[in-house]
Image: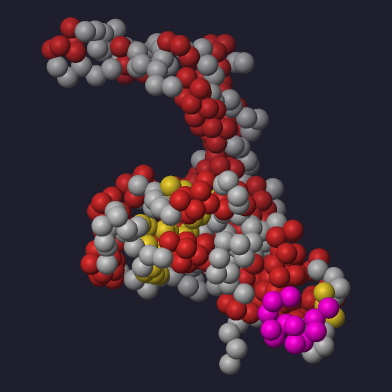
């Protein structure tokens, strides 16, 4: 039985690798390291089907170093330690460290990630992790600090067309079937920038001899809705439509995309996390109860699982979609981060510092600090920002009933500072 087309066309060298020119094109940072023959540990973050696993294998072949693979779905701490022991025994002086490739590293538990730290730090292994999730949330900070992060992008239209031409020219079975590629819009649309999905679609629609048109592609995919890999669409296209429907206050649209994810076998924790994020980013202070309900839905799904878990997810989805919207907290923290990056580590005003020692008190730490609860209304005016930025405004109330009340309270306390 022939291998799947996507596996047959997996590139073996960087010259055959399509896409990600910003990383492996001539003069790109990762290409320079590979050409120099030495790489440091790094994590590849990007959607499915853009070449993360393939790139790791190409690097190992190019450097001629032992290559170990673990899947975060099936491997435990013992498996990690066994591979590290093997890598240690295969390490020779001045040789590039053996490569340990971990697919879906975001699924590793904290203890599993902890078990990697020593080997990565001492160079026993060079870690290459692959993830479709934001490493800032899913990879522990000590491990992330020991790795470079490289972001892979969905393949562009030109990349996908190049892959199609490359496949029809080089794959023996495709050449034998005399495929004529007359139209490509539908294939590109359904692939969603995912090379593996594109090749799966091509393999599905090909007959002997075959003329590929948009109509034929749509017809075949409607007849075989689960015949091609949906991971990329489920994780990116559909979740995007889901969140945008909530943000746009359309409960029907949000429920539809939720149903698509449930029916497609999406991880319920993935959906629940996005609801929590949406409650903070898109509803925010306009309805603070949204975050409480989203968190409660997350807990409920973790406790009861499928299929009943779809109900609290639906409840939270409808509640968030029908809630008033505000992104003032989201905008506020982004403005604050921008200010911090522009101004650096400004000193904390002396009156806001703790003074646990006699010397600190002598230096003026905590002097003139006013304890709010000692004043009428539990408030007294004083400076809370560093001197250099004391007049900056970071949070701006938006036009909704809840934040209008918050703004009025701030004006009553602070005067025109919050009236702007």
**Residues shaded magenta:** 169-180
User: Could you say which is closer to the camera, residue 293 or residue 159?
Assistant: 159
Q: Is residue 225 magenta?
A: no
Residue in the picture at 55% in, 13% down: 417
Q: Is residue 175 magenta?
A: yes
- Is 309 left or right of 367, judged from the image as shown? right
Residue in the picture at 56% in, 42% down: 281
User: Could you say which is closer to the camera, residue 44 or residue 377?
Assistant: 44
User: Could you say which is closer to the camera, residue 412 or residue 196?
Assistant: 196
Report which quarter residue 298 is drawn in.
Answer: bottom left
| Residue 69 x, y percent position in the rendering | 39, 69
Report which quarter residue 403 is drawn in.
Answer: top right
Residue in the picture at 24% in, 19% down: 354
User: Could you say which is closer to the camera, residue 332 or residue 93?
Assistant: 93
| Residue 411 x, y percent position in the rendering | 54, 16
Confirm whether residue 300 shows in the render.
Answer: no
* 175 is higher (above) or lower (below) than 60: below
| Residue 321 x, y percent position in the rendering | 63, 51
* Residue farthest to the left, as pictured: 358
- Is 63 left or right of 1, judged from the image as shown? left
- Quadrant placement of the C terminus: top right
| Residue 86 x, y percent position in the rendering | 26, 69
């Amino acid at each position: 039985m022939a291998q799947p087309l996507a596996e047959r066309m997996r590139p073996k060298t960087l010259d055959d690798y399509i896409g990600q020119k910003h990383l492996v094109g001539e003069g790109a940072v990762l290409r320079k390291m590979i050409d120099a023959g030495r790489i440091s540990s790094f994590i590849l973050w990007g959607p499915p089907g853009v070449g993360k696993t393939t790139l790791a294998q190409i690097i190992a072949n190019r450097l001629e170093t032992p290559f170990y693979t673990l899947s975060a779905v099936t491997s435990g701490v013992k498996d990690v330690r066994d591979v590290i022991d093997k890598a240690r025994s295969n390490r020779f002086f001045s040789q590039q460290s053996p490569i340990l490739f971990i697919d879906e590293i975001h699924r590793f538990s904290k203890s599993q990630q902890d078990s990697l730290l020593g080997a990565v730090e001492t160079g026993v292994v060079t870690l290459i992790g692959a993830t479709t999730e934001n490493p800032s949330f899913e990879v522990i900070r000590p491990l992330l600090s020991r790795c470079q992060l490289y972001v892979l992008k969905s393949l562009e239209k030109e990349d996908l067309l190049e892959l199609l031409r490359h496949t029809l020219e080089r794959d023996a079975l495709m050449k034998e079937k005399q495929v004529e590629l007359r139209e490509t819009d539908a294939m590109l649309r359904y692939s969603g920038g995912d090379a593996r999905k594109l090749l799966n679609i091509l393999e599905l629609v090909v007959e002997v001899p075959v003329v590929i048109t948009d109509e034929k592609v749509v017809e075949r995919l409607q007849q075989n809705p689960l015949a091609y890999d949906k991971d990329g669409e489920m994780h990116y296209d559909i979740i995007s439509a889901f969140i945008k429907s909530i943000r746009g206050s359309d409960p029907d649209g949000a429920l539809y995309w939720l149903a698509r994810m449930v029916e497609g076998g999406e991880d319920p924790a993935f959906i629940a996390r996005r609801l929590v994020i949406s409650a903070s980013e898109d509803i925010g202070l306009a309805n603070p109860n949204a975050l409480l309900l989203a968190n409660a839905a997350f807990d409920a799904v973790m406790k009861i699982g499928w299929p009943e878990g779809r109900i609290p997810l639906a409840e939270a989805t409808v509640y968030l979609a029908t809630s008033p919207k505000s992104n003032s907290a989201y905008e506020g923290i982004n403005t604050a981060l921008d200010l911090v990056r522009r101004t650096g580590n400004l000193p904390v005003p002396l009156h806001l510092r703790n003074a646990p020692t006699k010397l600190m008190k002598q230096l003026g730490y905590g002097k003139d600090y006013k304890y709010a609860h000692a004043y009428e209304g539990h408030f007294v005016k004083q400076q809370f920002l560093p001197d250099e930025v004391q007049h900056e405004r970071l949070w701006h109330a938006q036009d909704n009933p809840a934040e209008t009340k918050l703004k009025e309270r701030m004006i009553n306390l602070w005067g025109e500072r919050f009236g702007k």
